[in-house]
Image: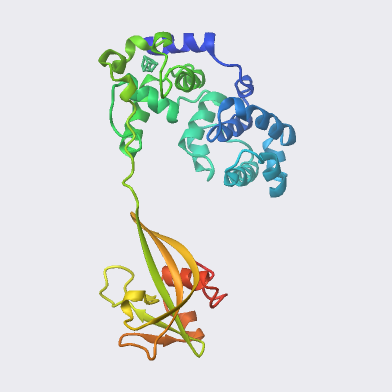
Amino acid sequence: MKFAQSLLGWYLRHRRDLPWRRTRDPYRIWISEVMLQQTRAQAVIPYYEKFLERFPTVEALAGAAEQEVLAAWSGLGYYSRARNLRKTAQEIVSAGGFPRDYEAMRELPGIGPYTAAAIASIAFGGPHAVLDGNVMRVIARLENDSSDIGASQTRERFTRIAQGLLDPKQPGDFNQAMMELGATVCLPRAPQCLLCPVARECRALAEGTVEQLPVKLRKAAQERIEQTLVLIEQDGRLLAWQRPSDAGRMAGFWELPDGGQLPGVLLGKTLGHFRHTITRHLYLFTVRAGAVPRAPRGFFWLGRADIRTIPLSTTARKALRAAGRFPGLVDKL
Ligand code: SF4
C-alpha cells in the first residue's frame, strides 16, 4: 500500500478543484465522466454546470425532449452521447433509480466498464479500478511495459494491474488520483518525473524508457482503390451479373458491371460517386452511364420487380443510390 499512500498524499495536496469533485451524486459524476471522455476538464466545466442547471436530476433528464438535451449539449460534439445519456436516464428512472453496484451499472446499455468503475468507486466506494488513457500511460511507464495499448489483451492486463494497485478503502480518491497523475504529471510528452509522487516505483524512469512509452501501434494503412461501375439501362431494365454460388465473397449476390468486364462499352456521363470499405481496402467508386449493343454472355437485364426480390450487393445498392435510380428499393444499405 506504499504506492497508494504516496499517490493519495500527493492527490490530496495537489488535486485541481473541479466541480464534479465536490459531489458524490452518481448522476452528476456520470454526466461529468461522459463529458470528460471527449473534452479536457477545464473546457468541460461551463457545459457541465449549464447541463446540470437545466437537468439537475436523472428524472429531469429522463423526462426531457431529445431536442432540449441536444441543445444543452451543443458545443461538446459527439451528439450520440447526449442521445444515449437521455435513453439511459430513462432506463435508470424506470428501474427505480441509479444502481449502486458495478455489475448493475454494466447492465445499462449506455454505461461501459470505465464509466461504471468511475461511478461505483467515486459515488459508492466500490472497489473497482478505472482504466482510461491517462491511467494506461501511467501503468505502461510504472511497469516499463511496451505492449501495444491498443490491444485488448494489454487493456485486460493493465486493468488487473490497476486493480492490484487500488486502495480498496479509498477507491474513488485512488482512481481520481491515478487519472490526475496522468493528466497533470505523467504527461504524454515531457512528463514531470521530478514532481512525481511515485517516481521511486517507476520502472520506466529507472530504465530510461519513459519517453518511449506507452506504445501504440498504428493500424496498417488503408489501401485506396479507384474503380468504375457502369450503369446500363434499357427499357427501364438494368444490366447486372450474379456472383457464382462458389464465389469466396458475396456468393449469389447481384452486381453492376465494372468497366473492364464489358469490352466495347460506350461510357457516358458520370452519375455519382461513393465510398465502400472492405477490410483494409477503401474503394472509391465512380458510377458512369454506359451502353452496349446487347447483353454480353453472363449478364442479364433486371426489371424493377427483380430488384425488389434478388439479393443485390451493397456496392450495387450504393451505386444505384448514388445515381438516383430505383429510389425506394435501394434506400436500405
Ligand atoms: Fe510517469 Fe515519470 Fe512518474 Fe514514471 S516517474 S509514473 S514516467 S511521471
Q: Which quadrant of the frame does ligand 1 lie within?
A: top left
Q: What is the basis of the colouring in this image? A: rainbow
Task: Give the image location of residue 260, x and y in percent.
Answer: 32, 75
Q: Which of 140 and 219 is in front in this view?
A: 219
> Residue 63, can we see it?
yes
Q: Which residue is drawn at 43% across and 72% down?
A: 316
Q: Which residue is drawn at 51% across and 84% down?
A: 304
Q: Which of 311 and 317 is in front in this view?
A: 317
Task: Give the image location of residue 263, x and y in percent.
Answer: 31, 82
Q: Residue at x 38, y 19 (%)?
A: 165
Q: Residue 315: which quarter of the image?
A: bottom left
Task: Give the image location of residue 244, x and y in percent.
Answer: 29, 78
In the image, is residue 128 above or below residue 306?
above
Query: How many numbered marks, from 0 up?
Result: 0
Q: Residue at x 32, y 31 (%)?
A: 215
Q: Residue 249: which quarter of the image?
A: bottom left
Task: Give the image location of residue 57, x and y in percent.
Answer: 70, 34
Residue that lies at the very extreme toward the right in this rendered image: 54
In the image, is residue 275 above or below residue 331?
above
Q: Nearer the viewer, residue 189 or 288?
A: 288
- Where does the N terminus fall, quadrant-wise? top left
> Residue 163, can we see it?
no
